[in-house]
Image (spheres, rainbow, N blue to C red):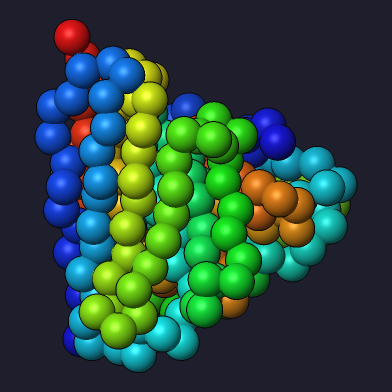
Amino acid sequence: EVQLVESGGGLVQPGGSLRLSCAASGFTFSGYSMSWVRQAPGQGLEWVSYISSSSTTIHYADSVKGRFTISRDNAKNSLFLQMNSLRVEDTAVYYCVRESSYSFNYWGQGTLVTVSS
Amino acid sequence: QSALTQPASVSGSAGQSITISCTGTSSDVGRYNLVSWYQQHPGKAPKLMIYEDSKRPSGVSNRFSGSKSGNTASLTISGLQAEDEADYHCCSYTGSSTPWVFGGGTKLTVL
């Protein structure tokens, strides 16, 4: 069974940093591209960042470019999102998602990031 | 890349059919056969319902179908059931440096 379990969310002040982690199991993690997708309270979904299976290709949404860094450790079946210079508008549930056929076929349960003073 | 346009809400009676539209541009929805649809119940993670415009993942009911015409994709749910009440999100691959764009989401109410 495919499982994606996020951790690392919490309350942080504007300008602060957080590192999200996603532990993957039930599939060959090194064979799949992964993304982070977020959802602000009461809002729609927003794609945040993408990393290819071997980390050779990385993309970011314009809203987070230069502040967020995506990475992965295939040996540890883990995906990460380092978030710096956090803003109030980054407040959201962050989902770790597996990409297949240009869609997102497995989602974690999400981790809540709240940016507030 | 601007968000795709979806109606904020749609409703239908149990047993009826409804269609949710998702309008993009010739750079995203109209350029690739790569629109996907996600169902999200309150407090839950989204679930993939349709990919590549009209394909259903294993385990998804055949009451759910996807189609596209030009820059507008559509999700049709036939034989509405109470458990279909949820938010539905469309998403398109763009092929750009920001590869995916979502719609704003549509709340489906089953009367």
Residue A66, above or below A60: above
Residue at image coords 35%, 51%: A81
* Quarter of the figure that contains the C terminus of chain B: top left
Residue at image coords 44%, 41%: A68
Is B36 in front, or is A79?
A79
Residue A95, above or below A92: below
Q: Please state the horizontal and vertical placement of residue B74, each as a whole percent of the image.
A: 63, 53
Locate residue A109: give its quadrant.
Answer: bottom left
Residue at image coords 58%, 59%: A58
Tell me: A45 left or right of B34.
Answer: left
Q: Please state the horizontal and vertical placement of residue B41, each as a whole percent of the image.
A: 24, 48
Tell me: A28 left or right of A4.
Answer: right
Is B102 in front, or is B21?
B102
* Quarter of the figure that contains the N terminus of chain B: top right
Q: Is residue B84 visible?
A: no
Residue at image coords 35%, 90%: A28
Q: Please state the horizontal and vertical placement of residue A78, each as a whole percent of the image.
A: 28, 71
Q: Please state the horizontal and vertical placement of residue B72, each as a whole percent of the image.
A: 74, 47
Q: Residue furthest top?
A: A117
